[in-house]
Image (cartoon, coloured by chain):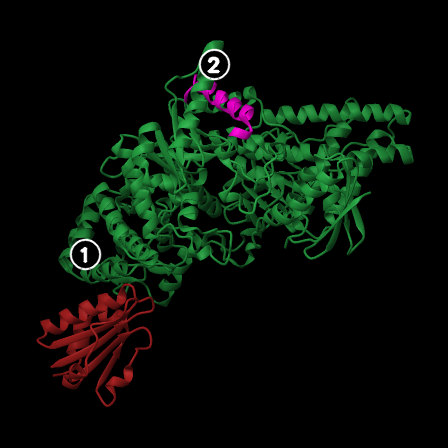
Amino acid sequence: MAKELSFRFPLPHGLHARPASLLRDAAGSFQSAITLINRRNDLKANAKSALALVATLTRQGDECTLLIAGGDEPAAAEALRRFISVELSLCDEAPPAVPAAQGSSPLPRALRGEGVRVHRGRSASGGIGRAPALLAARWNGGPDLANREKGSPEAEFAKLERAFVEVGAALRARRAAAANNTERGVLNAHLAILEDVELKAKIADEIGRSGAGAGQAVAAAVEHFAAVLRDSGSAVLAERVLDLRDVGELLVRALDPGTARDDRIALERDAVVVAQTLSPAHFLALDKARLKGLVLARGGATSHTVILARALGVPCVTGVAEAVRTLRDGQEIVVDGERGLLVADPSPAVSEFYDAENAALRTIRERVERTAARDAATSDGRRIEVAANVSSLAEVQEALVAGAEGVGLFRTELLFMDRAEAPSEDEQAEVFAAAARLAGARSVIIRTLDVGGDKPIPYLHLPEERNPFLGFRAIRTYAAHPGIVAAQIRACLRASACGNVKIMFPMVSSLDDVRMLRGLVAAEMERLAAAGVPFDRDIGVGVMVEVPSLAFVMDQVAREVDFCSIGSNDLLQYLLAVDRDNQLVAHLYTPFEPAFLRALAAVCDGAHACGRWVGLCGELGGDPLAVPLLVGLGLDEISVGCARVSAVKSAIAGCAMPECRQLLESAMRQETAADVEALLRAFAAKRADRSLLAEDLVRLQSRSRTRDEAIRELVGLLRTAGRVGDPDRVEDAIWQREETYSTAVGFGVAIPHCTSEGVLATSIAVASYPAGVEWQSLDGSPVTMAILIAVNANDPGETHLKTIAALSRKLMDDEFRASLLAAASAAEVVALLRSAVEVS
Amino acid sequence: MNIVAITACPTGIAHTYMAAERLEKAARRLGHTIKVETQGAMGIENELSADDIARADVVILAAGIAVRNRDRFAGMRIVEVPVQDAIKDPERIVAGLGT
């Protein structure tokens, strides 16, 4: 007797790739045949095929039925009922926003000249590349299949089986050798397509029903699903067509290695590749040393090719169908991935502009890399490690490149997801050891399995609970899975022989927990020692502080652990009893609640009193507003997402211990979260004020010859210092002001200025011109010094404006101007400007 | 002579304050008393009081834009100049007021 589950499809973005693959995972572990029926359009799909599920074109609100028939019906029905009511509603995520065509933003001034041929598109990957165009628009189509020899259906089936095995092995091998997470992700997507049951069924059907050769059958099946994806009405799904074709092509080539034409693009010299579309596999096959840029007529921000280009730093502009039609092979082009522009046959002036752009981008990159390479410390020399939170080996690599001083949180759940049984001890030991070797002397903190009823790991058989966050999760489940836990602990211990590994346990709430866990570690140490397996006996064993009870017994807990790391997200939600995913109470979730700050202080002080090291891993660590507070707490380490590492390092560098301690004390005495936040904002504003001026914003003896060049140079100084985000916009705002009347106020001084959203931090830049620059000044004299005032439109800062007003007045003083013009160094200019503002 | 003045400019960032500074210095050098209200990015500062205005012999408006609360000066002698002139040659403006 088949079972039926009816439901209304809940997700605003419909049944797209992510929910489809999760539903496939949920259905895939049962023997029963499971079919999804969409009652709106009567389309049916095998629920074990993500492709077929997507093809039902299910939208929010559609009436759907799951039909379950087979031996394990009751279990399957129960699991799917739970999947629909709990996980499905949680797994929606908006497809990444596709940036709007940048047709409205004005061109940079340098490209507005006559005769400059600019094509506008969308910026898909940043950077600027220049080389002759290589038109790849004619490459498509794939191998010629029409006149292939074909055998009996049985022979074709056998060939097909071999091809599937071969392609699967090849994709897995490439995944293992992938250069980064992005590439790995794309290869995973290709493997998922290869393993899709309905794709294979459709191919087999073509062979069996219409007597097609295996190659033709693959092509027909690929086209069938490609049409479905294209017609889905979803841009994100339509972009998966290229991935599907890649897999089809790999299969066809494996079927007939001898005859398949290799149509990959060979780069014999530097080139910008120009194509209608380019599949991910073709992109990966390009020689990246010669590939200077990529121009695609079509291809959105979510296509895998574009995502790969971004990961590999290849400038890319898309949405330029007209340009792709009109460009000639070998024509020199500039791909401006920063602005989404193409410039054909660049003139000397345009070349000069882009040379300067490239130099600026290089300077910015070098500044970021320099920060990344430095260990984090406060301005008065207190070291605070900035580590990264990661979920995979590839992320460890990325984090270290981004300047992380170790791994503060290695989440191990990913190793356990999307599979039929737990990973083996060997598999985990290999991953952890590789991470330890990558990190060298830096520490890698591995957090043991942290799952509860909210995460779908079928083989753990975690029960459905009313409130999984207060229930059977993390270490509380360990007694139910002693083998899995022991294997993971042994894997950590084994990795400790290869580097600086530490073990961290999640969801610890009492000293009993600590003792139980230390017991588990001691037992596995004995087993490894007895077997003669090497490990580090002094391996650090610590706890995550996320259950508030620990804050009250830190004196006892700290004695029995080697370190603690504050899991700020959970600690906050448990302390305030707020589920931040619940829109009705999410506004109560604020880390600036004085009670939370006091809890953090209790944990830090308690741990330090026993001489223990305390870190923090959680979103709070990445909030620039909060960093001074965290410094004031005396944390030894802050662990954040890879992308935040460098920002947190520079935020720490701007802090001094005594003022941060004072700030924390004063914050803990505030009465409301709003008061704390206001206090932090005032503190941040005060610090920013000091940095209105800086030596790297001064250029003496500039060689700029014209007002145009001078303004571009001044904006460039702010841009390379990270104070201007959108130089084109800032230049335009300055020119708009210049055009009302010249800002050259006489006496050889100009004060160009603007208020613009393109300014990130209100700043002053200064340049001097020994030869003088014509500026249409009020008294007709050439300008020998320009002082650029750039004000952030969103947050000008009252104190900044006061400073600038005072400075403007001071510039009217003859003596002051004379001393400024006579200054011999950038340091002297900054000191003079600063003293002027302070005296007045 | 008692002078009151208002300075203002399109962005209110620099010229407003430069002009105020120049007018103040020039007037004092020529032996007059002056009070200058600035209407800039920080709003109105050093605001002219009713007393200031009642005592004044003349009003200088050095602004590239419309001046706020202009009706305060109804019936008074008003001299309007571009803000850039107040920066370039304030003494000529002050001297031109007569005695």
> Which residue is nearer to you in this view: A392 or A10?
A10
**Spot occupied by residue A716 in the image (x, y as percentages of width and height):** 37, 48
Chain letter for the part of the structure drawn in green: A
> Which residue is nearer to you in this view: A30 or A292?
A30
Q: Colour of chain B?
A: red
Find disc 1 in the rendering and name its residue: A837
Find disc 2 in the rendering and name its residue: A528
Residue A738 colored magenta? no
Q: Residue furthest front?
A: A512
- Asked whether residue A363 is in view, the answer is no
**Spot occupied by residue A488 in the image (x, y as percentages of width and height):** 51, 24
Residue B11 vertical placement versus A572 (above, below) = below
Callout 1 environment at 10 Å: few (<14), some (14 to 19), or many (20+)?
some
Residue A614 vertical placement versus B47 (above, below) = above
Three-letter amino acid code of the residue under disc 1:
Val
Residue A493 colored magenta? yes
**Spot occupied by residue B46 in the image (x, y as percentages of width and height):** 20, 72
Q: SS class of the residue under badge 1?
A: helix
Nearest to N terminus: mark 2 or mark 1? 2
Q: Main secondary structure of the magenta part?
A: helix
Span colored in magenta: A479-500
